[in-house]
Image (tube, rainbow, N blue to C red):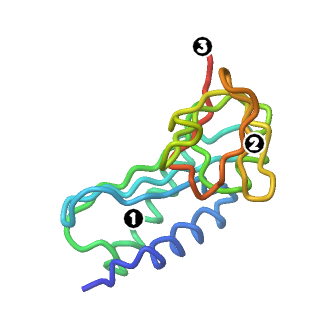
Amino acid sequence: MGTDGPDELGVIIERVINREGLELVHWERVGPPGNSILRIYIDRPGGVNHDDCERVSRQVGLLVDVEDLIPGRYTLEVSSPGVERGLYKPADYARFAGNRIKLRTLEPIQGQRGFRGTLKGLSEDRVVLETDNAGTIEIPYEKVAKANIEFKF
């Protein structure tokens, strides 16, 4: 039986994605044991296509099955991060500075948990955001629950 270790999953996922010349945006495993979902988000300059997702899915699925890292049934989903891509790493906050984002904190900051505005970047482990209604605010990176680019259609 496999160890079901997230570190082992991460190593396999990163190895496959690096070999394919892609960027690992984020991966997560959700749902109950025996019926979980393994989601992998990939990207590259100019975007990814169906063939990229298929190659990653085939290779990761094979390695996860051979190593028996996810006991029982699971669903593997591989896709691009989409236009409202999540910001998961500190480097994302520098890379996407100048974009509009929506951000949710783990606890209230200045009386609120949800913020929208223009991302100014990351400064000394603080997300700098020019908010729509409260001016410039600095949010400790460790207090961010979720952040996404906000795409205006």
At x 58%, y 68%, the residue is 14
Q: Amino acid at mark 3?
A: Phe
Residue 61 is labelled as 1
At x 30%, y 72%, the residue is 70
- Foreground pick, 84 / 71: 84
Alpha carbons under labels 2 and 1: distance apart: 39 Å
**Quadrant (top left/top right/bottom left/bottom right) for the N terminus:** bottom left
Q: Does the residue at mark 2 contact the one at mark 1 (Cβ under 8 Å)?
A: no
Q: Does the residue at mark 1 contact the one at mark 3 (Cβ under 8 Å)?
A: no
Residue 153 is labelled as 3
Q: Position of residue 48 (x, y in %)?
A: 62, 42
Residue 96 falls left or right of residue 113 = right
Q: Is residue 78 above or below residue 62?
A: above
Q: Position of residue 132 (x, y in %)?
A: 67, 21
Graded by Cα atoms within 10 Å as few (under 14), some (14 to 19) or many (20 or more), the crowding at tag 1 reads some
Residue 152 is labelled as none
Residue annotated with mark 2: 128
Alpha carbons under labels 2 and 3: distance apart: 24 Å
Q: Position of residue 12 (x, y in %)?
A: 51, 73
Q: Is residue 117 above or below residue 28?
A: above
Label 2 secondary element: strand
Graded by Cα atoms within 10 Å as few (under 14), some (14 to 19) or many (20 or more), the crowding at tag 2 reads many
Graded by Cα atoms within 10 Å as few (under 14), some (14 to 19) or many (20 or more), the crowding at tag 3 reads few
Q: Amino acid at mark 1?
A: Gly
Image label count: 3
Q: Quadrant of residue 128?
A: top right
Q: Amino acid at mark 2?
A: Val
- Foreground pick, 84 / 138: 138
